[in-house]
Image (tube, rainbow, N blue to C red):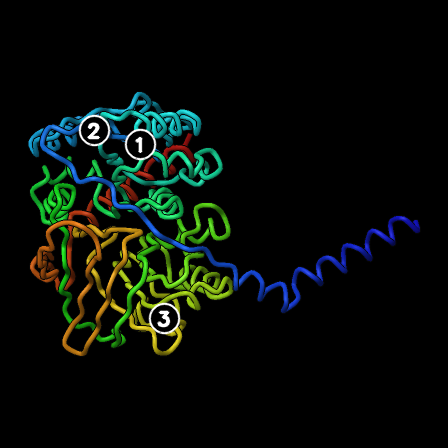
């Protein structure tokens, strides 16, 4: 009985120490220096690996994406486990997905890695892929959504990467839309210099820093791990989200606040918040997020990148310059390559029906929800 009491007292003391202001301050003051090398731009006939580090992609979509890459003058190479299906969702077991990544990184003939889709599952790879391998084999890795984990690992490893559209999108659009052509041009050395229209929630100011972030639901759970690029000093934080209501986004933003992320921010870029239900008393997700950003930090809202039809490429890990004024904003990257002016308003398709923007991306998501419901209903009936 005495031993049990002693253990209980020790547990209480340890918990108190963990929750003490001093301990919290230590966590918030933990930072790392971010300095990322720029992978070489591609040349015609270079090989690009098509991989599925998260969910499975039907092979017909992979082949269609490969056809687009061939049309661009590249040579696509499909990873060995891309066609696998594990647990009904994943493109193989974690070790198989890591195996494809390691192959593409170590093969000197592969000059870039294009992910087929996101979904879920890269969090399982965080402790399986050493940062040293990413550092040693510097090449462009392209993706978004759940691929955010890998982009952040590249940043921590000291290698720039591209938050951009993936194989499934190329298959759907045949690579003819601005999101795809800007990605192609970036891989070939044309670096976009973005001019963005004014947004009612913008906060004016000037900032420079390393661009980090991505999908909020994906990078928040890996805070404090080797995949956490928000530990960098002087960062510009990019956030986008899909299908999450305001209360869940609010919970995740508070997690960033409690981990001192905004204290390390010099600027914030808010992308698309697609199909995010308003269940709190804010006019928009942007208004809610801005309420947590400390005064004096410039915020660019409405950058067309994320889970809607337009998903303009961003160079993660690159030194970025953000300028926000009442007239609009600009976002540029301090890296080698030919700077090409891009007006984001020229890239945004605006088909309207009944006063609401209806995009192919939204149609696809609605169709998926209907199919999932029918499968669920069929399972109940049986």
Q: Which mark is residue 52?
A: 1
* Viewer can see residue 351: no
Q: Quadrant of residue 12?
A: bottom right
Instruction: Describe the element under mark 1 as helix, strand or loop.
Output: loop
**Image location of residue 281, percent across then percent down:** 38, 73
Residue 77 vs residue 155, the one in the foreground: 155
Going from N to C along the chain, the mark reached first, 3 or 2, is 2
First in sequence: mark 1 vs mark 3: 1
Query: Residue, x 34% and y 61% (percent of image)?
Result: 237
Residue with the mark numbered 2: 62
Determine which residue is flagged by label 3: 288
> Percent x, y for residue 252?
44, 59
Callout 3 secondary element:
helix
Horizontal side, residue 105 vs residue 121: left or right: left
| C-beta proximity under 8 Å, tags 2 and 1 | yes
Can see residue 271?
Answer: yes
Query: What residue lies at 11% left-to-right and 40% top-to-bottom?
Result: 173
């Amino acid at each position: 009985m005495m031993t049990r009491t002693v253990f209980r007292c020790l547990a209480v003391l340890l918990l108190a120490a963990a929750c003490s202001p001093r301990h919290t301050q230590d966590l918030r003051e933990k930072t790392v220096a971010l300095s990322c090398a720029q992978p070489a731009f591609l040349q015609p006939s270079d090989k690009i690996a098509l991989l599925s580090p998260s969910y499975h992609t039907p092979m017909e979509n992979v082949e269609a994406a490969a056809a687009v890459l061939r049309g661009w003058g590249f040579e696509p190479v499909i990873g060995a486990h891309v066609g696998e299906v594990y647990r009904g969702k994943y493109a193989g077991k974690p070790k198989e997905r890591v195996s494809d990544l390691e192959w593409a990184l170590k093969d000197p003939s592969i000059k870039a890695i294009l992910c087929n889709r996101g979904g879920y599952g890269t969090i399982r790879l965080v402790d399986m892929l050493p940062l040293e391998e990413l550092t040693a084999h510097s090449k462009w890795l392209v993706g978004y959504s759940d691929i955010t984990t890998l982009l952040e690992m590249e940043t921590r490893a000291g290698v720039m990467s591209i938050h951009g559209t993936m194989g499934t999108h190329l298959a759907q659009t045949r690579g003819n839309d601005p999101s795809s052509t800007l990605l192609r041009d970036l891989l070939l050395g044309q670096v976009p210099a973005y001019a963005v229209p004014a947004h009612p929630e913008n906060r004016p100011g000037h900032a420079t820093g390393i661009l980090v972030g991505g999908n909020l639901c994906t990078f928040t759970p890996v805070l404090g791990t080797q995949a956490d690029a928000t530990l960098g000093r002087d960062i510009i934080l990019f956030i986008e989200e899909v299908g999450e209501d305001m209360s869940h986004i609010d919970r995740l933003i508070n997690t960033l606040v409690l981990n001192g992320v905004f204290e390390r921010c010099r600027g914030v870029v808010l992308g698309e918040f697609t199909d995010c239900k308003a269940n709190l008393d804010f006019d928009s997700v942007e208004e809610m997020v801005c309420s947590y950003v400390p005064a004096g930090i410039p915020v660019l809202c409405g950058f067309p990148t994320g889970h809607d039809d337009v998903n303009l490429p961003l160079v993660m890990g690159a030194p970025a310059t953000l300028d926000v004024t009442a007239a609009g904003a600009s976002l540029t990257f301090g890296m080698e390559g030919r700077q090409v002016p891009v007006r984001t308003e020229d890239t945004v398709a605006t088909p309207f029906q009944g006063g609401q923007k209806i995009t192919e991306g939204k149609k696809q998501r609605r169709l998926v929800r209907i199919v999932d419901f029918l499968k669920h209903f069929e399972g109940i009936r049986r």
